[in-house]
Image (cartoon, rainbow, N blue to C red):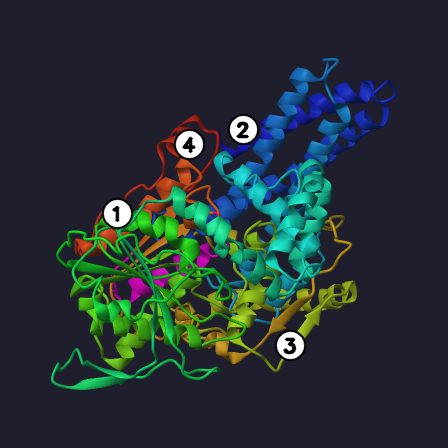
């Protein structure tokens, strides 16, 4: 179903229902019927304003793709989300049309449903207007606004005051595949119940027990859940999120996960002492470089790791390795205490860095899919439990990861590995650490990994605005306020911090928004008239290198500038304002923290990189722009974009067929590294059969993922 047909269907169903209920507004249904009439009318008003905006994006958003075969970028994602919201409204409107004459029809309930989606559509309309500003203020083909002030700061201030509860109640996860929504609802209910009891109890068990008994009210009252979810995400500190995300580390949940996951012969937690050692240089093996122990912030300390192997291989039960084992209150390995036939060492080793926003989780939370990977790939996996922020901010995690990588190369005989080939893999924060660890290996001159597989990586940790980052307004797993707290914790203390917590700051910023808009328009037009003019807007040279000139004949489309918000329109505002802190520390622009900002010379030394992104992930633009940068310096890179799944799908891989298929995409990329498929390949589709069928039916206009080197 094309865009015009979608909007036509929306107008038709809304008008037909509004006419029906307006005739009975004074009857038995009374106020509920009038609510439906008002909501249907307001939905049509939003739709009439959105239709030309979406058509405008559709005319130009292909310029921001990594490749014509991989139509994915934040502008496409925003349009997709709006389309998905409209399709839900159409579906609900048709349900109302079919059942409204029934004596069992609940007018008030259905009015509440339509009001929730109307509120969501209103907020999405505001996001598209903000995206229009990005589209016109950025250089052509560039997804990021390269200033932390101005437009980026304006978006953060808008976020602090915009209403978000509607996205966490009845509309929770509407943009994702239906199979994942019950899981997201469970997470949301658990989060708000946990937040209500946080600080009331000293022990995690007490919080969990109280949360269980208070969760019922949030399950039956979506409006209450949405309001509480908004309050928690906006105002609780990073220590709360650390505690909540670490629930999966508790003995009860980890034991349940262990029972349902693949059984492996080796699952051993290791604690490697902080002892310096030498490694040979790649350029001249006769020369060595000393690998120092991690010491930033807290001084030298052991590096924690976990060795997982589906088969028991030579060296994995050696006395030297057993001396490094640490107890976790349970069996260290299924192979201990019995004679098990040993397999020969593997030619490959997978070094894994887990996600968790740099502040939470360990390899234990990621065991289920790592065990499955060890079986499917037939290789040992070394997962690194790097130090976490805020106790150990940048660069301690990077030091731990680099030391663990070098230690594995030095002690390959203990890991059931021949030392021949090694691949790095990680998700989210772990994807960042895979890339930066390789950059550090290049700077030290030691052996490089044979490839990197990074799933939905965080590659740019600055506050730069991008269209996909606008999704943080309503993403249930990665809200902007939570993301900013995690990244600020990883960056460490900053001197220049601005607190945003009042509506007056939003009003004060209106003048700045208009000023920046006028300057952006002037700069864009001037740059077209005088291409040799020096850049007026300060931005990273690295990111600017991937911008492209507008094609001939399309300048008229690009130069059409919208206002911030049209006259008469205002997004819904929240009663609880987010306490956002705008950190301006220069450390976030360090290439070892934000590899997207690394100079070309650092990127040229990297191994082949396989990026697996999510079309609806706020971090999508990080992967798209990083893939462009790597391609521009002739580095081998593939980009695969999976559809309809949230950030962090690897941790949900056992919950649905769609998440399992997406996890298999990562496994296949690792196999590409193992098989040394370095030659360019044709783009390949990574969608499940169900999603392909939905595209053919026209149910959803989704983004097809692919790959290219």
Q: Secondary structure at mark 4?
A: helix
Cα–Cα span, label 2 and label 4: 15 Å
The picture places residue 69, in percent across and down from the top left corner, at 32, 45
- Which residue bears the numbered disc 1? 375
Q: Nearer the viewer, mark 2 or mark 4?
A: 4
Badge nearest the viewer, 3 or 4: 3
Circle 3 residues within 10 Å: few <14, some 14–19, many ≥20: few
Asked if the magenta segment contains residue 634, the reply would be: yes
Q: Which SS class for mark 2?
A: helix
Q: CA distance from mark 3 to mark 4?
A: 46 Å
Farthest residue toward the top? 102
Which residue is at 75% across, 52% downward? 573
Q: Which residue is mark 4?
A: 695
What separation in Å lies between label 3 and label 1 (alpha carbons)? 48 Å
Distance between the alpha carbons at the discs numbered 1 and 4: 33 Å
Q: Residues within 10 Å of mark 2 (few under 14, many from 20)?
A: few
Ranked by sequence position, the earlier of labels 3 and 1 is 1
**Which label sits on residue 570?**
none
Answer with mark 3 or mark 4, whichever residue precedes in sequence: 3
Occupied quadrant, residue 676: bottom left
N-terminal of the two: label 2 or label 4?
A: 2
Other residues around mark 4 within 10 Å, as few (<14) / some (14–19) / many (≥20): some
Give whichever of discs 1 and 4 has the lower sequence position.
1
Question: Label 4 near label 1: C-beta < 8 Å?
Answer: no
Left or right of 429, for residue 486: right
Residue receiving disc 2: 5
Range of residues picked out in magenta: 616-637
Instruction: Give the alpha-carbon distance from disc 2 to disc 1, as whole Å.
Output: 47 Å
Q: Considering depth in this image, is 337 or 120 the residue closer to the camera?
A: 337
Earlier-in-chain disc, 2 versus 1: 2
Q: Is residue 703 above or below residue 194?
A: above
């Amino acid at each position: 179903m094309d865009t015009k047909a979608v909007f036509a269907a929306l107008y038709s169903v809304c008008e037909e229902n509004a006419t029906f209920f307006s005739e009975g507004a004074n009857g038995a249904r009374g106020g509920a019927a009038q609510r439906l009439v008002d909501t249907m009318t307001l939905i049509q008003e939003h739709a009439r304003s959105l239709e030309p905006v979406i058509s405008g994006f559709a005319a130009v958003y292909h310029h921001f793709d990594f490749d014509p075969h991989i139509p994915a970028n934040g502008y496409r994602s925003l349009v997709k989300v709006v389309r998905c919201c409209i399709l839900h409204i159409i579906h609900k409107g048709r349900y109302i049309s079919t059942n409204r004459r029934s004596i069992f029809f609940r007018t008030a309930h259905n009015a509440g449903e339509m009001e929730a989606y109307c509120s969501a559509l209103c907020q999405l309309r505001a996001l598209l207007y903000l995206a229009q500003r990005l589209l016109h203020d950025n250089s052509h083909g560039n997804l990021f606004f390269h200033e932390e002030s101005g437009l980026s700061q304006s978006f953060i201030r808008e976020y602090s005051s915009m209403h978000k509860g509607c996205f966490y109640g009845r509309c929770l996860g509407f943009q994702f595949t239906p199979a994942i929504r019950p899981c997201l609802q469970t997470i949301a209910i658990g989060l708000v119940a946990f937040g209500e009891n946080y600080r009331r109890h000293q022990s995690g068990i007490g919080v969990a027990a109280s949360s269980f008994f208070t969760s019922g009210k949030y399950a039956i009252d979506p409006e209450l859940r949405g309001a509480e979810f908004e309050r928690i995400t906006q105002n609780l500190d990073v220590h709360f999120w650390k505690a909540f995300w670490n629930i999966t580390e508790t003995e009860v949940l980890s034991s349940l996960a262990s029972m349902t996951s693949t059984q492996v012969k080796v699952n051993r937690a290791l604690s490697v002492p902080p002892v310096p050692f030498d490694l040979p240089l790649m350029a001249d093996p006769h020369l060595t470089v000393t690998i120092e122990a991690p010491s930033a912030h807290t001084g030298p300390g052991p590096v924690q790791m976990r060795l997982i192997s589906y088969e028991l291989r030579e060296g994995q039960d050696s006395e030297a390795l057993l001396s490094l084992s640490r107890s976790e209150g349970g069996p260290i390995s299924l192979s201990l205490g019995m004679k098990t036939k040993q397999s020969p060492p593997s030619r490959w080793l997978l070094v894994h860095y887990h996600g968790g926003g740099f502040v939470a989780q360990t390899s234990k939370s990621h065991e289920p899919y790592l065990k499955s990977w060890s079986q499917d790939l037939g290789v040992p996996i070394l997962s690194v439990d790097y130090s976490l922020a805020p106790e150990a901010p940048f660069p301690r995690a990077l030091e731990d990861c680099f030391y663990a990588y070098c230690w594995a190369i030095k002690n390959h005989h203990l890991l059931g590995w021949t030392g021949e080939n090694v691949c790095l893999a990680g998700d989210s924060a772990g994807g960042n650490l895979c890339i930066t660890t390789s950059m550090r290996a290049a700077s030290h001159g030691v052996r490089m990994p044979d490839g990197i597989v990074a799933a939905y990586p965080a590659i740019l940790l600055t506050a730069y605005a991008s269209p996909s980052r606008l999704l943080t307004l309503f993403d249930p797993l990665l809200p902007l306020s939570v993301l900013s707290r995690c990244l600020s914790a990883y960056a460490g203390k900053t001197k220049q911090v601005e607190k945003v917590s009042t509506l007056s700051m939003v009003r004060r910023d209106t003048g700045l928004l208009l000023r920046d808009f006028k300057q952006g328009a002037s700069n864009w037009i001037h740059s077209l008239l005088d291409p040799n003019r020096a850049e007026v807007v300060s931005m990273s040279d690295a990111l600017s290198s991937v911008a492209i000139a507008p094609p001939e004949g399309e300048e008229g489309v690009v130069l059409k500038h919208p206002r911030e918000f049209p006259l008469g329109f205002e997004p819904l505002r929240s009663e609880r304002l987010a306490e956002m802190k705008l950190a301006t520390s220069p450390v976030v622009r360090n290439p070892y923290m934000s590899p997207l900002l690394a100079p070309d010379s650092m990127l040229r030394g990297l191994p082949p990189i396989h990026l697996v992104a999510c079309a609806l992930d706020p971090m999508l633009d990080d992967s798209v722009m990083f893939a462009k940068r790597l391609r521009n310096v002739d580095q081998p890179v593939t980009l695969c974009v999976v559809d309809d799944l949230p950030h962090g799908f690897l941790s949900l891989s056992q919950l649905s067929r769609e998440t399992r298929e997406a996890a298999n995409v990562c496994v296949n990329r690792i196999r590409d590294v193992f098989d040394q498929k370095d030659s360019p390949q044709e783009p390949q589709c990574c969608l499940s059969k169900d999603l392909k069928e939905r595209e053919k039916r026209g149910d959803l206009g989704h983004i097809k993922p692919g790959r290219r080197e």
